[in-house]
Each structure stands twice: as structure tokens, then as C-alpha cells.
Image: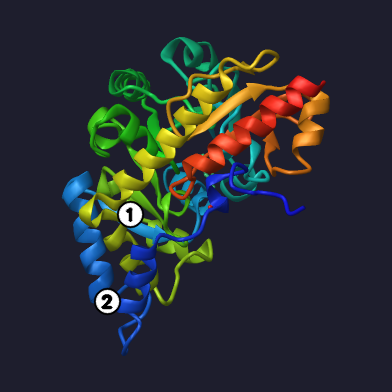
Amino acid sequence: MSVFAGFGSDNHSGVHPDILSALRNVNDGYVVAYGHDEYTEQAITQLKEIFGKKTAIFFVYNGTAANILGLRSVTDSFHSIFCAESAHLTVHECCGPENYIGAKLVNIPTPDGKLSVDFVEPYLIGVDDPHMAQPHVISITQATERGTVYRPKEIQSLADFAHHHNMLLHMDGARLCNAAAFLKTGLHEISGEAGVDVLSFGGTKNGMMYGEAVVFFDTQLAKNFEFIRKQGMQLTSKMRYISAQFSAFLANDLWLRNASHANEMARLLAEQLQNIPGIEITQKVEANMLYAVIPNQCITRLQKQYYFHRFNERTCEVRLMCSFTTQPPDVLSFAQAIRKTVGET
Ligand SMILES: Cc1ncc(COP(=O)(O)O)c(C=O)c1O
């Protein structure tokens, strides 16, 4: 029996047809490489309409690069970057930030993936002490790796705290669209408008083939980014193919439709799982993923049919993720398979 991979990650889904047509539509003829083309100009204009004219915006291939290069642009090797201990930045970027930026990552425990001023404050130590890493950035993820979503006020209070202490607020927005869809806000309201200084704005997980944007809300912070991106091997020559995707992603609210659907599917899965004895949903289901504790032997059996990850290989907490392509019948069959497996043990 083949294994169904649809609940493993939103990265497991394909590319939205509108994005594929956008790629086809820009494929004819010649345009100047490395972003000096009309498609890139158009995509940047669309992004500026959302995030504000006084931004500096750059495309890279993937989310890891958006995070690391964006942070590299604003950080020195003697700095520290505060993040949640579950942050992609610290767990799933293979020490890339430490290696590439040289700065210290300070991992802060949090029950739901969200940082707050109360969590961060105790780590603000050693300021001006030359023996100690200098606190410089707070990095948050929206929506978080635990599927929870920061409210605008929560972001604003972290931004105020950061700025008050001469720090910056960075946001990994690989799933910013899912957060905005959940909150029914615009993308800017939960990033730049709430005080974020540097944003990684994700497209890949929400229907694009590849491509993320690094958005600097203060152009001064971006002054070296062109060089950092090139050194970081993320200056794509055929930039038109990222730009065309972003244009289609933003047109007709495709980003919102995709993210709303993915979130809705996660909610449907939660409804299905919430009353199964032996299953405990461990996090609020706000974006497009669900965390649940499932008995160990059931996980092993289910994974013969369904591909999904344990949050931590030593625990029985699993992450189930939906995407813009998740179909209700697939959710219902998966829930039924879980119900059956749990019932049999
Ligand atoms: C929250 C978050 N940030 C960043 C990334 C990195 O994206 P990529 O795999 O494109 O480098 C991911 C990937 O899953 C992610 O979940």
C-alpha cells in the first residue's frame, strides 16, 4: 500500500495551477537576468502595496535563506538572537544561523511556540559587557511552528520591548498567510505595522513552487543585503520565475484563499479527532497544523499508511499538517484510520 504523504507537511503539496500558468506566461522571450526585469519590478510593486512603499524587498529561493540572510544583514557575530526553542531557525536550519551569521542563538522555552516579553526579559543580560554576547534580535515565527498565531498586540509589545532595548524584531513568516487568514487581518497588520523590522515572507508552503521574500521595513537595514544575498548564493539569475509566482500569489487574493482552505482543513481534522478517546490535542489549532498525543504503537501502525512527523522523536506528540490541496474526504479517511487504530489497541 502506498503511503499518503498529504498530512506530513504543507511542503508535500504541489503547486497551485495559477502559479503554474504564471510561470508559463513569463516563459517566452528574453529578459535581463538577476532581477532587472519588468516582472520583478511588478512583483516588488505589488509587495510594496501591501507592506508599504518605504520597504526594501528581495527574493530568495527558500525559507531558510530568507531567515539566515535577513538576519545576517542586521546582525554581527558578537550579537545574540533570541528565539523560541521550537523555532525553525534553531531546530531545523542545521546550525546555519550560527555558522553563517556567527551570532549566538538563545533558545527560550515556551509552551506554545510563542514568545512574550515575560519570557524574553530574563534573557536580557550582559548588555555592554564585552565578555558576553550582545542581545540584538528577537526572532518570532508567525504562525508558529506549534500552529499558534500571534495577535497584533502581542507582536507590538515584543517590538516595543525590542526597540526600547535597542534590539530588532525579526519575523519568520513562512506561514504569515495562514496567520493572517486565521486572524482575518492583512499581512502588514501582523508584521510591519505591528513593529516587525525584518520579515521572511513565505510563498512555498502556500501554493508557490519556490520563492520567499525578505522584507526590510527600514531600508537602512537592507543596505548590504544585495551583497549578502549574492555571497549567500541566493541571487537567482532567472529571477522572473520567482517574481511571476509572487505576482500571481498576490493577485485575486490567491494567498488568502489557499491559506484559509489549509486552516479550515486543520480545523476539520481537529473536530474529527477531538472526541477520540486516547487522543489528546496538545495545541490550539489556529493555523494549518494540529499537534496531538497518540499512543506510541498507534503512531507506528498509522505511519505504515500515512506519512507524518513526531514533533520530537522521543515523544508521542505528532504534527499533522494541512495545505491548500488537502481535501475533506482525505481528512475524514485519515481521522477514520486514527479512530480505528486507536480503537484496536
Ligand atoms: C517556520 C518555518 N520557517 C522556515 C522554513 C524553511 O523553509 P525552507 O525549507 O524553504 O528552507 C520552514 C520550513 O518548513 C518553516 O516551517
Counting from the top left corner in percent of width and height, residue 1 is at 77, 52
- Residue 104 badge: none
* Residue 33, visible in the rendered structure: yes
| 117 left or right of 54 in image | right
At mark 2, the secondary structure is loop
Counting from the top left corner in percent of width and height, residue 231 is at 52, 64
Q: Disc 2 or 1, which lies upstream in sequence? A: 2
| 95 left or right of 72 in image | right
Residue wearing tag 1: 223
Distance between mark 2 and mark 1 Cα atoms: 21 Å
The three-letter code of the residue at mark 1 reads: Lys
**The quarter of the displayed image where residue 236 is located:** bottom left
At mark 1, the secondary structure is loop
Residue wearing tag 2: 37
Counting from the top left corner in percent of width and height, residue 238 is at 41, 77
Give the image's coloring scheme.
rainbow
Residue at image position (58%, 22%) is 273
| 20 left or right of 78 in image | left
Residue at image position (66%, 43%) is 95
Q: Is residue 264 above or below residue 148?
A: below
**The quarter of the displayed image where residue 190 is located:** top left
Classify the position of the C terminus by image quarter: top right
The three-letter code of the residue at mark 2 reads: Asp
Counting from the top left corner in percent of width and height, residue 140 is at 45, 30
* Residue 132, visible in the rendered structure: no
Instruction: State the residue lying farthest toward the bottom.
Output: 29
Residue at image position (40%, 60%) is 16
Q: Is residue 58 above or below residue 159?
A: below
